[in-house]
Amino acid sequence: MIHLGIIGTGWITHQFVEAAHETKKYRLVAVYSRRLETAQEFGERYGDVEYAIDLDTFFGLAHMDTVYIASPNSLHYEQAKQAILAGKNVIVEKPAFSTPTEMDEIIELANEKRVFFFEAARNIHEESYRKIADFLPVKDRIIGANFTYMKYSSRYDAVLAGKEPNIFSPHFSGGALMDLGIYPLYAALGWFGMPESMHYFARKIATEVDGIGTIVLRYDGFDVTIQQGKNADSFLPSEIYLDNGTLVMNGINAFDKAAFHDREQKEIKKLEITAKENPMVEEAADFAKVIENPTDPKLGDIYQEWVELSRNVNKVIYHLRQDAGIVFDADKKD
């Protein structure tokens, strides 16, 4: 049984804990918050849980072996570092880190301390993602793709009112690219690899981060266009264009419907894919397999693939931010 501790008491942490418990591989044993009342309010539904209001006490809990971190983005690096130094595996909610320097240091430290680092990018752990990957032909038959993920954030209302919520703050490494754009980037890099070049046409909001934007990833022979944003809603599907038809997916952050419109055969072929009620179950199960089988060579290779994909996505996001002139406080530390 994996003994789980959590940092961050928002809705996404509840969703992960519930997913972890559904796998029957985890048990929540500890909750950290700066306020005891907040920690207790979070943990009361999960039974016998310890609470901590300082990180030294939290990371000193000997029976806790894995920490899920879902604090504001800019805090991930220091908290993950402290957890790893305490001998804990870390599951860091996407986006894991603000810069490639932070990412590289955490990966190196995790390897040194013989613990695991996972970025919780849930869409690549869905069985449906792998089925789509298996369906795709060799790259020279792909002629383009268009991915869309745009969802209006309720916290954008605070920006309009002159405030700066964490998710839209450069001090906390916020913005649309970091929050929503990471999903289509994970899909693109997971299916197609690293692009040859990239560009980000971003529209900044009052807080000087991006509210909406268009990404172009250029590959050898095709381009991937990504539309993403947090100050508008989109209901467009995502599509991959092949030389003999078009694969249409109803989402890119999660996959529950996909169909290939075969131009040559003049028919529509539905892919047999389904989605879990809790979209974080599959990633929690994947992480548990690796944690519980640390010497399995096959799982070790899969883990390294996840780590390198996280590293590459982080590099691409950093490059896109620089291209768009989006500067975080974390950039000034490099």
Image: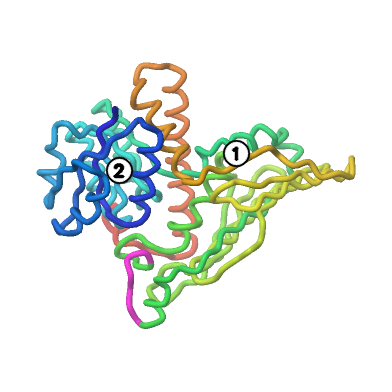
- Judge whether residue 164 is colored magenta: yes
**Helix, strand or loop status at disc 1:** helix
| Relative image position of residue 117 (x, y in whole percent) | 33, 35
**Helix, strand or loop status at disc 2:** strand
Residue type marked 2: Tyr
Using the rendered image of the protein, determine whether residue 82 is visible from the camera's viewpoint: no
Tell me the tag on residue 250: none
Using the rendered image of the protein, determine whether residue 177 is visible from the camera's viewpoint: yes
Rendering quarter of residue 21:
top left
Residue located beneath label 2 in the image: 68
For the point 56% across and 43% down, the residue is 275
Residue type marked 1: Ser
> On the picture, is 67 further left or further right than 300?
left
Residue located beneath label 1 in the image: 128
Of residues 158 and 189, the one nearer the viewer is 158
| Relative image position of residue 115 (x, y in whole percent) | 28, 29
Magenta span covers which residues? 162-167
Q: CA distance from mark 1 to mark 2?
A: 24 Å
- Judge whether residue 13 is colored magenta: no
View extreme (bottom): residue: 161
For the point 33% across and 73% down, the residue is 164
Colour scheme shown: rainbow
Rendering quarter of residue 158:
bottom left
Compared with 259, 180 (above or below) is: below
> On the picture, is 117 further left or further right than 7?
right
For the point 89% across and 40% down, the residue is 265
Compared with 317, 110 (above or below) is: above
Q: Main secondary structure of the magenta part?
A: loop
Of residues 190 and 290, the one nearer the viewer is 290
Q: Are marks 1 and 2 in contact (CB under 8 Å)?
A: no
For the point 36% across and 16% down, the residue is 295
